Image (tube, helix red, strand yellow):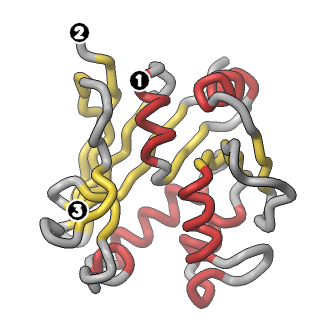
Amino acid sequence: MTATYTFDVFCSLDGFASYGAGGDWGGYWGKQGPEFLDHRLAVVSKAQRMVLGATTFRQFLHFLGPGSAEPDGGDPVNTRMKNLPTTVVSSTLEGPLDWPDATLVSGDAVDVIARLKEESDVPLRSHGSLSLNRALMAAGLVDRVQLTIFPVITGRTGEESVFQGAADFDLELLSGRTFDGRIQELVYRPTLHG
């Protein structure tokens, strides 16, 4: 049985995954609420394996801290994400990684993830890792795109356009929810267009 692979990404309404130094929004663009945080904890509390590219892994290491360091004063969502079994796909990083339960795999990401999907007995989830996931989508390896849209426009400070340079896709909406009256989560099944 092939494991389901979910590309999980947060973005602004105008499609940016982060904001630059002049943005001054804070985590979750400062829009998180209790309903959203409870939902995210439930999402990351399920049995699954995280998949990260090198850039996102470095960001996680920077923001969540190395090894056994408590992230964000013990934030339960970040603590759980940090402690999930994690595969880091990279040709630039060297092991061992200072991260709980992390496996470093080098090689072509498409080959690595195709093999991991066949071997994994739990679903796979990748948070962020934009270039990695655009390549995996083009290869038909992404089963779900879980897009969480925060109610902000980052026209001047937005960085990392989520789908810039991606192939064209048709999307089948599988589910949609609103949290705290302002945050949208849309889950799609992507299919290459044409």
- For label 1, the residue is 138
Distance between mark 1 and mark 3 Cα atoms: 23 Å
Q: Which mark is first along the chain, 1 or 2? A: 1
**SS under mark 2:** loop
Q: Which mark is first along the chain, 3 or 1? A: 3
Question: Residue lying furthest bottom in this view?
Answer: 73
| Callout 1–callout 3 Cβ contact below 8 Å | no
Q: Is residue 190 visible?
A: yes
> Residue visible at 67% across and 44% down?
90
Q: Position of residue 95 (x, y in %)?
A: 84, 55
> Residue visible at 67% across and 18% down?
1
Q: Position of residue 56 (x, y in %)?
A: 54, 58
Position above or below: 118 against 131: above
Question: Residue lying furthest top in this view?
Answer: 194
**SS under mark 1:** helix
Q: Nearer the viewer, mark 1 or mark 3?
A: 1
Name the amino acid, label 1: Ala
Distance between mark 2 and mark 1 Cα atoms: 12 Å
Q: Position of residue 81 (x, y in %)?
A: 61, 63
Relative side of 141 to 145, left or right: right
**SS under mark 3:** strand
> Residue visible at 79% across and 74% down?
67
Q: Residues within 10 Å of mark 1 (few under 14, many from 20)?
A: some
- For label 3, the residue is 12
Q: Is residue 153 visible?
A: no
Name the amino acid, label 2: Gly
Q: Residues within 10 Å of mark 2 (few under 14, many from 20)?
A: few
Relative side of 11 to 38, left or right: left
